[in-house]
Image (cartoon, rainbow, N blue to C red):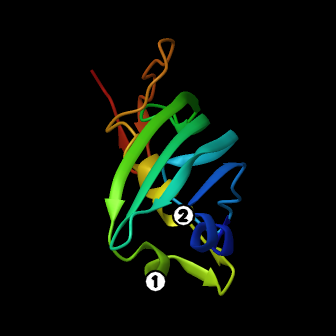
């Protein structure tokens, strides 16, 4: 959460938070660890500048055996948003930038997550078997 009153009063608010993203889900992501978001939001009269740096670790499902694959997060986001206060207002006193953080994390998911030591050893399954 970002303090909307400070943003409206001073024109800029800085934050260093560990957001709770428990309400957000993706089938590829098993867990997000050590998530930290630092940055600032500036009120530029008709638009807002949001600058954030997201760090942490995401545990993904291996595409081969569904085991754990670790992916470090080091994301820089710098954008100008017209309706930030209206679109992300949580209460009259705070902004919820969790959707912005989550969208940027989703962009970091690789198409195929694998570990160096993953081996494909499946030779049979439900209704099938490799014969030769």
x, y percentage for residue 128?
Answer: 35, 43
- Looking at this view, is 87 or 111 the one in front? 87
| Residue extending furthest toward the left | 132
Left/right placement of residue 61 relative to residue 128 reads right
First in sequence: mark 1 vs mark 2: 2
Q: Quadrant of residue 124?
A: top left
Question: Residue at position x 41%, y 28% from top?
Answer: 123
Which part of the image, by quadrant, shows the N terminus? bottom right
- Looking at this view, is 75 or 49 the one in front? 49
Question: Residue at position x 55%, y 28% from top?
Answer: 72
Label 1 CA crowd tier, 10 Å (few <14, some 14–19, many 20+): few
In the rendered image, is residue 75 in sight?
yes
x, y percentage for residue 105?
Answer: 47, 47
Which part of the image, by quadrant, shows the C terminus? top left
Q: Quadrant of residue 11?
A: bottom right
- Looking at this view, is 83 or 100 the one in front? 83
Q: Is residue 80 above or below residue 68?
A: below
Residue 11: assigned label: 2
| Residue extending furthest toward the bottom | 92
| Residue extending furthest toward the top | 117
Query: According to the image, label 1 marks what residue?
Result: 86
Circle count: 2
């Amino acid at each position: 959460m970002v303090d909307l009153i400070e943003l409206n009063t001073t024109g800029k608010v800085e934050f260093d938070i560990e957001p709770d993203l428990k309400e957000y889900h993706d089938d590829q992501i098993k867990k997000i660890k050590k998530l930290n978001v630092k940055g600032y939001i500036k009120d530029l009269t008709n638009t807002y500048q949001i600058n954030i740096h997201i760090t942490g670790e995401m545990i993904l499902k291996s595409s081969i055996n569904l085991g754990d694959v670790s992916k470090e997060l080091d994301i820089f986001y710098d954008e100008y948003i017209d309706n930030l206060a209206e679109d992300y207002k949580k209460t009259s006193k705070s902004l919820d930038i969790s959707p912005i953080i989550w969208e940027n994390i989703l962009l970091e998911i690789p198409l195929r997550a694998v570990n160096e030591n993953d081996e494909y050893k499946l030779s049979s399954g439900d209704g099938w078997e490799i014969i030769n």
